[in-house]
Image (tube, rainbow, N blue to C red):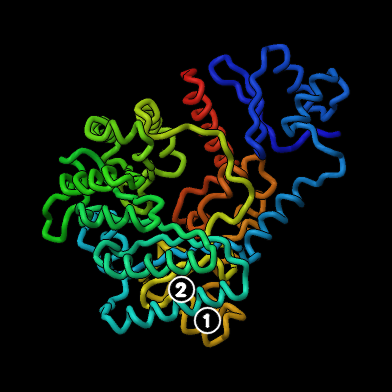
């Protein structure tokens, strides 16, 4: 038996822990065992341990068979997820390029590069037909077990009719072929009235994500209509409509230097209005970093800056702290090379990352091209190949991520962040292993929140 390389000793406010970063097993240690085990791991010598100590470590994955090559196992799992067609289909579908909002951090960065389209019934009909051909091909050729669709845009609520029509088709298709269907909607929440919320509750909606960027006076300065009118009050009404219809709702808060001092106030306001639904687990928060804007925090700044916000969100029940790791896998569609995981817009264009949907020259092929090629290959588009190559964990950070003990927690970062680091557009947190320090900090913060030791 030998010690796993995927472990971390953590000293938190006088408490000692040993964490297995593969399976998330956590053992709290007294001073004696902390020093004893640190020495044993450092020397890679388990002979100094008692039998019962070895048994505990083996049961929790800290001691493994000598024949196991952990790096090859991690690498192969990653490559399998990258190139193997999954039985679980995942489609990110941008149903419109239009939006009824004019959010500063969106339009200041992307308005000039957005393609101009006019969506009509003919385009919608063609898209639906091509989507049916794709799904029929996947069902006929692969043992499809589930289908998950994420609706976004633009602003998807501007195309409720199309979403509801396709949801009904997918539900019917799932029933006919014994396929689990669920969908997620990423929306600004402005157009969710009672009737819309009722329909969503009947259409296998896993959750709806709605962005709120602060209390009313702050949110309305950041996320307003094209005519500059505020949106906060109506969005909260939409959230209420969803919650009272039993639809899980995630409030995404985009945080930067301009609103960070007001987010705790927002959390208190949300709790005051929706306390009952928070208690039922229907309402949660996602605290996200605004990237690429003049007020954005760097990658290394953001997580420490949001510390008190996290504590507030956990205390009030909006976030459940967890040490569970994500395993070893491709992060998302951006680094996969399979038909079972696609990002598509309503015009049939296919992309590697939804950050670039509707951006000029960013798609790498179309549904038409896939159908014409009988789905046998993905067209060898240079932009696509360059993107997949640049963001691959075999290349990003000089291939070191797959050897890192924290790979199961950060997954090597979002692929688009990897690309931006390589291009000098984001802080290079790979340098001097700053990324490891960030992940370790986040793990410690989760332990503090779980055990209330701070």
Asked if 342 appears above or below 309 in the picture, the reply is below
- Cα distance in 3D space between marks 2 and 1: 10 Å
As rendered, which of 283 and 178 lies closer to the eye?
A: 178
Nearer the observer: mark 2 or 1; the answer is 1
Asked if 96 appears above or below 194 in the picture, the reply is below
Lower position in the chain sequence, tag 2 or tag 1: 2
Question: Which residue is located at x 37 percent, y 66 percent?
Answer: 168
Question: Which residue is located at x 26 percent, y 43 percent?
Answer: 244
Q: Which residue is mark 2?
A: 350
Position of 414 with respect to 295 (left or right) is right
Give the SS element for disc 2: strand
Question: Which residue is located at x 34 percent, y 50 percent?
Answer: 209
Q: Which residue is mark 1?
A: 370
Position of 172 with respect to 246 (left or right) is right
Q: For the N terminus, which image quadrant?
A: top right
Q: Are marks 2 and 1 in contact (CB under 8 Å)?
A: yes
Name the mark on residue 19. Answer: none
Provide residue 228's location: percent of width, then percent of height.
12, 55
Q: Quadrant of residue 276?
A: top left
Question: Which residue is located at x 17 percent, y 50 percent?
Answer: 231
Q: Quadrant of residue 406?
A: top right
As rendered, which of 125 and 100 lies closer to the eye?
A: 125
Asked if 334 appears above or below 229 in the picture, the reply is below
């Amino acid at each position: 038996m030998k010690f796993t390389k995927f472990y971390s000793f953590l000293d938190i406010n006088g408490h000692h822990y040993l964490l297995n970063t593969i399976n998330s097993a956590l053992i709290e240690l007294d001073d004696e065992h902390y020093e004893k085990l640190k020495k044993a791991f450092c020397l890679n010598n388990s002979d100094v341990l008692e039998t019962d100590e070895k048994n505990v470590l083996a049961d929790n994955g800290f001691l493994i068979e000598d024949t196991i090559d952990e790096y090859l196992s991690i690498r192969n799992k990653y490559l399998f997820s990258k190139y193997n067609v999954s039985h679980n289909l995942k489609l990110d579908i941008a149903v419109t390029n239009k939006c009824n909002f004019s959010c500063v951090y969106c339009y200041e960065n992307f308005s000039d590069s957005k393609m101009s389209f006019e969506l009509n019934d003919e385009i919608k009909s063609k898209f639906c037909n091509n989507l049916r051909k794709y799904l029929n091909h996947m069902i006929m050729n692969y043992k499809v077990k589930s289908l998950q669709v994420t609706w976004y845009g633009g602003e998807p609520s501007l195309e409720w009719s199309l979403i509801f029509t396709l949801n009904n088709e997918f539900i019917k298709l799932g029933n006919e072929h014994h396929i689990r269907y669920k969908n997620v909607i990423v929306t600004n929440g402005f157009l969710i009235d009672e009737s819309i919320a009722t329909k969503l509750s009947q259409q296998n909606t896993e959750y709806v994500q709605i962005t709120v960027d602060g209390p009313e006076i702050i949110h309305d300065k950041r996320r307003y209509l094209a005519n500059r009118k505020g949106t906060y009050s109506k969005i909260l009404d939409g959230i209420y409509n969803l919650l009272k219809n039993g639809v899980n709702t995630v409030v995404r808060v985009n945080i930067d230097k301009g609103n960070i001092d007001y987010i705790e106030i927002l959390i208190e306001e949300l709790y005051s209005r929706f306390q009952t639904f928070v208690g039922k687990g229907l309402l949660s928060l996602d605290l996200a970093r605004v990237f690429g804007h003049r007020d954005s925090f760097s990658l290394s700044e953001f997580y420490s800056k949001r510390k008190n916000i996290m504590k507030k969100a956990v205390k009030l029940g909006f976030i459940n702290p967890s040490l569970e790791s994500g395993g070893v896998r491709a992060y998302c569609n951006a680094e996969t090379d399979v038909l079972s995981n696609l990002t598509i817009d309503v015009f049939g264009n296919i992309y590697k990352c939804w950050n670039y949907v509707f951006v000029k020259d960013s798609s790498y092929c179309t549904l038409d091209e896939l159908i014409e090629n009988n789905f046998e290959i993905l067209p060898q588009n240079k932009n696509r190949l360059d993107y997949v190559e640049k963001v691959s964990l075999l290349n990003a950070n000089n291939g070191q991520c797959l050897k890192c003990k924290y790979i199961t927690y950060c997954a090597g970062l979002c692929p688009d962040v990897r690309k931006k680091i390589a291009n000098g557009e984001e802080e290079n947190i790979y340098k001097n292993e700053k990324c490891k320090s960030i992940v370790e900090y986040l793990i410690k913060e989760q332990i503090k929140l779980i055990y209330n030791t701070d």
